[in-house]
Image: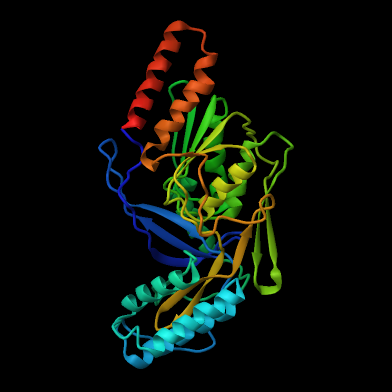
Amino acid sequence: MNEFTSAKPRYYIEKLQKKILNNCYYRWRTTIQITLEDTEEERMPRMLITLLLAAAAQASAHEVPQTKGTLDAATRHALVKELAQAVEDNYVFPDVAKKVAASLRQKDAKNAYASANTVTSLADMLTADLRSSGKDLHFSVRFDPAFKAAPENAVPSAEELIQQREETERLAGGIFRVERLPGNVGYLDVRGFETAAFSAPAIGAAMTLLKNTEAIILDLRKNGGGDSETVAYLLSHFFAEGDRRHLNDLVYRKDQRKEQSWTSTAVSVHYTRPVYVLTSKWTFSAAEECAYDFQTQKRATLVGEATGGAANPGGSFPLGGGLVAFISTGQAVNPITHTNWEGSGVKPDVATPADLALDVANARVLRDIVIPKIGDDKARAQLIAEAERLEKAAAK
């Protein structure tokens, strides 16, 4: 049975909350929901995956009257005008920002949004146009009348810290499954990169359980992203003690501010055996950085599909009328490639459909790493049979 459900998920922003730590892909917290078909082995509910959005947004200078969900023409024009200005003022690449803003204004002048008689339908149309003209999958507009912009570098309240800790613990720090497969192969399924301060214990516990395995298969196929600080913390466990690596930089349009991401030597587990990373087209944002970091550091073999292709950090901007736009205000720059995965996604080393990736990786680990070490004939025969079973399943 495949461990990955191949039914096409759908992403949407569900709510926005204050982010409580710096050095993230997102300074505003967005909960993303994926709809997944149930497997026969385990009935999975809709999994909540978190993204942490970076570069705090400032409130719009112009107010648009709040609506209860319906729109008149004047309000619609005002919202499009506000969005165009927010993109032009804040999008990471000024030339692209001008082009996208001009496209919005031209369409609005031609009454292209006249059919949007509710804020939600307008949000959907604007999201589609932003992504089409800007070629940036982080662009989005949604109706969220409860959203309130916070001052840049605002300090979270004690209540917010408690809420964030409770949510992270409820999600087990993003760790969905830890397992030791036949042949002493480790399997780690990470569904989201939660806030580092609160997810570190769960990550450390998972790595402690897997530290003596022959290889680790890290599953990011259903991971929608999260905190880049947590990405760095996870990767810190996969290099030798004292081996500190520069993983990624986030460079922002405003003042060309740069945030560097490095591994930490202050972790208890330093796993140096082989690693395989599973990816899918739904691997997104910070999860893509994780895969890209493993690949560019030559620390893992990637198996699966090209990832979603969203590399730019950004912030949330209230437009008025209950609409909120996410606009990328920075870009990821890898210190080795000097580029990123925006638009193209992270390309796997071994391309295979996502729902077969675990079988393919597991069979390779058994064939190349585990079986050659087994001296006991009976145990060897059992593992050969398991590898053949996996290869047969992957070939279907």
Residue 187 position, x and y percent, is 47, 33
Judge whether 296 appears above or below 372 on screen.
below
How is this picture coloured? rainbow
Which quarter shows the C terminus? top left
The quarter holding residue 251 reads bottom right
Q: How many marks?
A: 0
The residue at the far left in this view is: 40
Q: Residue at x 45, y 86 (%)?
A: 105
Residue 106 position, x and y percent, is 44, 86
Q: Residue at x 49, y 16 (%)?
A: 371
Left or right: 389 as drawn, with respect to 170: left
The quarter holding residue 254 reads bottom right
Residue 374 position, x and y percent, is 51, 12
The quarter holding residue 70 reads bottom left
Left or right: 325 as drawn, with respect to 54: left
Q: Nearer the viewer, residue 360 or 72?
A: 360
The residue at the far bottom in this view is: 74
Q: Residue at x 42, y 37 (%)?
A: 357
Which quarter shows the N terminus? top left
Residue 372 position, x and y percent, is 53, 15
The residue at the far right in this view is: 242
Q: Nearer the viewer, residue 264 or 36?
A: 36
Q: Decide if residue 238 is in sight here.
A: yes
Q: Nearer the viewer, residue 337 or 43?
A: 337
Judge whether 33 appears above or below 241 on screen.
below
Q: Decide if residue 59 is in sight here.
A: no
